[in-house]
Amino acid sequence: MNRRGLAGWVLLAPALLWVMAFFVVPFAVMALYSVWRREGTQLVREPSLVNYETFLDKSYLLDALFNSLEITAITVVLSVLFAYPLAYILAFLVPRRWQRLGLILAILPFWTSYLVRSYSWLLVLSENGVISQTLVTLGLLSETMSFANSNGATVLGFVHFFTMLLALTIYANLVQISPNYRRAAEDLGASRLQSFIHVVLPLSLPGIMIGAFITFVLAIGDYVTPQILGGNRELVMPQAILLQVQRRADFPMASAMSLVLMLVISAVFLASARWLKMDRV
Amino acid sequence: MTLWTRTFGIAAVFLAGIAPLHAADDELNALVWCDHSDPAFLEPFEEEHGVTVNIKEYEGTGVALALLEQSQPGDWDVFVVDGVDVPRIVEAGYLAPLDREGLPLDDIFPGIRDSEIHEIDGELYAVPEKFGYNTISYNASKVNADDMRDIAVLWGDAYSGRIAIYDYYIPLINLVAIGLGLREDGITADELPAIREHLLKMKEHSAMAGDVVSVQTALATGDVDIIAGGGEWATAVLMAEDPDMEWVNPDQGGVRWSQSIGVFRDAGNPELARKFVEYVLNPEGQARLATSSCYWAMPSNSKAALTDEEKSMLRWDEQETFIANSWPYFIPDPELDAMFLDIWTEMLQH
């Protein structure tokens, strides 16, 4: 190996060590645990697929996976629909000197604790919360009702957070698109709508996809928001995984379920990989 | 200083930072429930002995056991654990025998001494420090208090959509079993179909299920009027602001929980650990623990220095009846425990 190659490896070593220590090794341990099993209080270290079979056999555990996918899909779609116009306005319609202020406002929700934010939504959505009371005052409801403790509340909590995250990734992509592309399209007779559909939107797809993928990963693995706002009306995967651990300490089953979740995330990554052009964001 | 010595120095500092806890003479490391982290409870002990108590909170014995498996001997001094789990903790070799001398064992409510779980082969390993009930909490301004004395209200349709379920399968399955008259000799696998059926009915009539904070919040904000599996731990802290927040032990009886304190066999600071156990069990420590900001519950010491108002919130005068008409958690063997969790998960997903 020449000196240049060696220097490359040396410079890469900290990153490789970091990934080994905090991803590869824990992942390997989890994979190993998932093929062991718990019998009574004993951990049986004989490889088998019994935990995976149990997961597939029990419809309510499979339902947890489907609930997670459903809630996450709705969250991603709604977040993109809200975030895109926000990013577009910020990138193209707001004067450049005000864009910095707009970005600061966009990241304001990240300054508060995730837990506090979820509990705040719980109070807003509760039966005596501001939404219910306002609707009664306006005569739109005959009596107060709760909007909390439902999948809808979970989606709302997610969308509030992820819209801002997505707006940032889409904004970062939009500002890289040269205004000359739009000017050229309009010179060639395209309307503003046509130049958006045929020029801006395709060029901003990498920003949308990377933001959507991050949203997907963070939402499907989140425990806090469904636990606080969902009211356990229907379990999602992280809740079902934690149930295995809390009292029974069934780490093999919890590991198997976690790996299933990772497989789903990997499948989504592969499906969207062609659009995930990191260098464009 | 060479690059190597600097690098080594930085690494040493880093490793010292992440190294396991090791008890200094003036530090106590306690693995406990959240009620022990209240400064009003800890500070008198710390000031009296000039020490620092390092608290690690956990939820669920499974989590505590996982923590212990990853710890080194000497990392922990004091352990607070579900009373019913004391035998398996002793069996695993974690706890040291306690000298009875100087502990107010005679002052502990007779009904909760549970010597069969705290004493093994004549040795005392842990002492009950706090107890309470998983029964029914309710908002007295919204429901008929007489209805709350019947467990069947939890799966009847009188308060449909107004019930929160405390999300802990062991006490709730116990509570349903008591309501069905199945609890006299414990719970068997044959009884699970009937319990499952009633759990599913309860879920259909519930508005939500959640942890301690979630069900308390739901009751306080008016989202629900009843907590299935609630008790003094859920409503006593709310009573100060809203006297309508009540709890009751139903006529069929309730589930009684207790937490116990012991000293680790490999404690790094056993003398200080012993002093902490004595502090927790003395009347002043008991009063502070009973009224901890995390959750209130009955002190195990019948001479706890509580005010009349605090005693009233804890229904002190009814304790004799409540203790007599309640069952300690029935802890299933691991196989039955897995069945419990199965029907509970199915109920949550229903």
Image: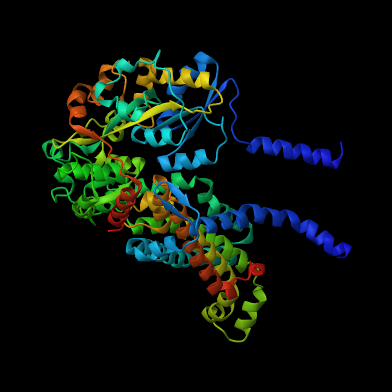
Q: Quadrant of the C terminus of chain A?
A: bottom right
Looking at the picture, how far across and down is residue A214, in whole percent? Answer: 54, 62
Relative depth, front residue between B170 and A110: B170
Q: Is residue B33 visible?
A: no
Query: Where on the picture, by quarter, is residue B145?
Result: top left
User: On screen, A240 above or below B213?
Assistant: below
Q: Residue furthest front?
A: B121
Colour convention of the picture: rainbow
Query: Where on the picture, by quarter, is residue B296?
Result: top left
User: On screen, A12 above or below B295?
Assistant: below
Looking at the picture, how far across and down is residue A83, in whole percent? Answer: 50, 64
Q: Quadrant of the N terminus of chain A?
A: bottom right
Relative depth, front residue between A186 and A140: A140
- Give the residue at x 47% y 62%: A48
Looking at the picture, how far across and down is residue B229, in whole percent? Answer: 26, 41
User: On screen, B163 above or below A266?
Assistant: above
Looking at the picture, how far across and down is residue B169, in whole percent? Answer: 30, 46
Relative depth, front residue between A265 and A210: A265
